[in-house]
Image (spheres, grey):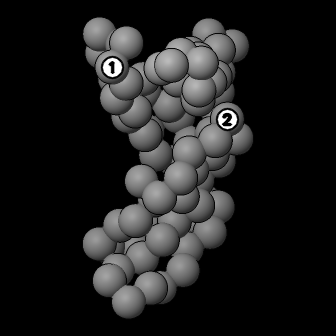
Amino acid sequence: MVNLSLAGACLQVATPLEPGIPIRLEVNAPDLWDPLKLPAKVVWLDKVDDGYRAGVQFQYDNAKLAGWLLDILTPEAYA
């Protein structure tokens, strides 16, 4: 994973992901027992020297997922 935000993520991948396809991204964090499984849609793809970069937009199916991701992204959670 190159970066992560509340709206989506940029992923480094070896094989291309077709824009428009649904995926499920799993995010591990030290304070979660199980990975956070986030439904997403591939919105762009770029070829880079060592593979591909894909931009994904999260497609939250419940508000709790967004809240848990916000907790992970909040720097104070790990201070």
Given residues 42 and 50, the one toward you in this image is 50
The residue at 34%/29% (across/down) is 28
Secondary structure under tag 1 reads loop
Density class for disc 2 (Cα within 10 Å; few <14, some 14-19, many ≥20) is: some
Q: Is residue 2 above or below residue 22?
A: below
Residue drawn at (37%, 12%) of the image = 31
Tag 2 secondary structure:
loop
Any part of residue 52 in sight = yes
Q: Decide which of 15, 5 is in the foreground and name it.
A: 5
Which of labels 2 and 1 is toward the front? 1
Q: Position of residue 78 (x, y in %)?
A: 47, 20
Kind of residue at badge 2:
Leu
Image height of 36 relative to 21, above or below: above
- Cα distance in 3D space between marks 2 and 1: 18 Å
Residue under the image location 48 percent in, 71 percent down: 53
Would residue 18 be seen by someone viewing this image from the given angle? no
**Direction from residue 63 to residue 76 in the image, left or right:** left
Numbered circles on residues, count: 2
Image position, residue 3 (x, y; %): 53, 53
> Which label number is shown at residue 30?
1
State the mark number for residue 6: 2
- Considering every residue shown, the one lying at the far bottom of the view is 49
Measuring from the top left, give residue 32's x and y in whole percent: 36, 13
Question: Taking 70 as reference, is 31 above or below it?
Answer: above
- Which x, y percent locates residue 75? 59, 26
**Quarter where residue 14 is shown:** bottom left
Q: What amino acid is labelled 1 in the image?
A: Pro
Image position of 57 (left or right of 34): right
| Other residues around mark 1 within 10 Å, as few (<14) / some (14–19) / many (≥20) | few
Name which of mark 2 and mark 1 comes first in the sequence.
2
